[in-house]
Image: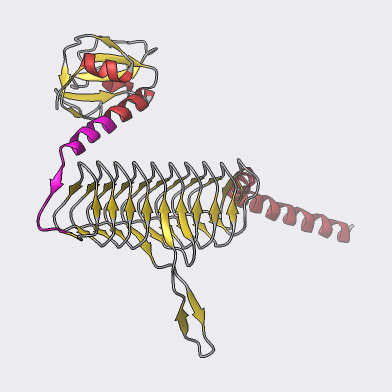
Amino acid sequence: MQFTAAQIAMMTGGQVEGDAQASVASFGKIEEAHAGQLAFLANPKYEEYLYSTQASIVIIHAALALKQPIAATLIRVQDPYSAFASLMAKYQELQAQQLSGIEQPSFIADSATIGNNVYIGAFAYISKQASIGEDSKIHPGSFIGERVQIGNNVVINAGVKIYHDCVIGNDVIIHAGTVIGSDGFGFAPQADGTYQKVPQLGNVIIEDQVEIGANTTIDRATMGSTIIRKGVKLDNLVQIAHNVEIGQSTVIAAQTGISGSTKVGKYVMIGGQAGVVGHITIADKTRINGKSGITKSIKEPNTAVNGNPAYDHTSFLRSQAVSRNLPELERKVKELEKLVAQLQAERLNA
């Protein structure tokens, strides 16, 4: 697919500086791009590459003052990063639109409902009474369980498994290897030291505009629903346990685990490898830094926490500063001990 600078400027609301008919067919990093590619400059650290890049078109900030002549055609916008991201999303959407039809071999139950313009890849399995909305794409090797509801314009990538009765909203993207609706970790201790499995009878509800990374697992509720609210973004390798609720537009980085029945608020940011215990609440707009351990509820919105167990971010930074000074403090204490001992000896000899 070819796009001219004039077309890109129209899509981004930018201004062309150079050849408006210059065209590109793919994307590249500004330091590595070659002719026929589109690049962007958002971070000032990379400005030096603007003057040497081989990219045919570069998106830059509207106010950037040039220090040298540039061979590439420029498109000036207010936010280069967002403009470039929107173009990549449009390009990906156009590529996805080329996928259509039902590949063989695949299995679709007679009682399943398939919307218009749906793509179903080879070796996909669509179970009884499942429904798939319009313009959705089910990639090869995916499993859609009984009575699963999938909305419109959903992308289910290769090897995704969605267990029975789960509900997927509109405009959702689920990446390869993710499992939705597996059993929650529920086992009742017995008198003889064994564990009896607690049936997991609920489901998972994923609302609109959610994106879920590769190899993430979201457990079904014991009763009721595990809920991922609108606009949530989950990274790869995230574990969401049974009956958890993740609030609107929350983002969670890789290798984070959320234990059962915890309620995470709206617009929360959780760094990688964080751990959250069960049956607590996390207030709206909380910021949890990577590798933090959350052991109790965070009730105050706009709180930032660090550490394990996690506590206030500012206090954490002060503690780190003190920790770095411990060797110097130890040296000073030893000097004071020597001085005290010397003064005591002088006093005894006086």
| Residue at the front extreme of this rendering | 111
The answer to whether residue 310 of the structure is visible from this angle is no
Query: Residue 36, image x and y in percent?
Result: 14, 23
Of residue 136 and residue 74, the one placed in the foreground of this image is 136
Q: Is residue 92 magenta?
A: yes
Q: Is residue 234 above or below residue 200?
A: above
Instruction: Please tell me in which quadrant of the rendered image residue 28 appears.
Output: top left
- What colour-coding does the image apply? secondary structure
Q: State the residue lying farthest toward the right.
A: 350
Asked if residue 58 is positioned above or below residue 143 in the image, the reply reads above
The span picked out in magenta is 88-107
Image coordinates for residue 277, horizontal then vertical, percent: 54, 61
Q: Does residue 26 belong to the magenta stretch?
A: no
Query: Horizontal placement of 87 versus 271: left or right?
Result: left
Residue 348's x, y, as percent? 87, 61
Residue 59 in sight from this viewpoint: yes
- Judged from this view, the residue extending furthest toward the left is 104
Q: How many marks?
A: 0
Q: Nearer the viewer, residue 145 or 7?
A: 145
Identify the residue shown where x is 59% and y is 54%.
281
Which quadrant is the C terminus positioned in? bottom right
Q: Nearer the viewer, residue 87 or 220?
A: 220
Q: Position of residue 140 (x, y in %)?
A: 18, 54
Residue under the point 15% across and 42% down: 100
The structure residue drawn at horizontal position 42% and vertical position 47%, both measured from the top left corner, is 207
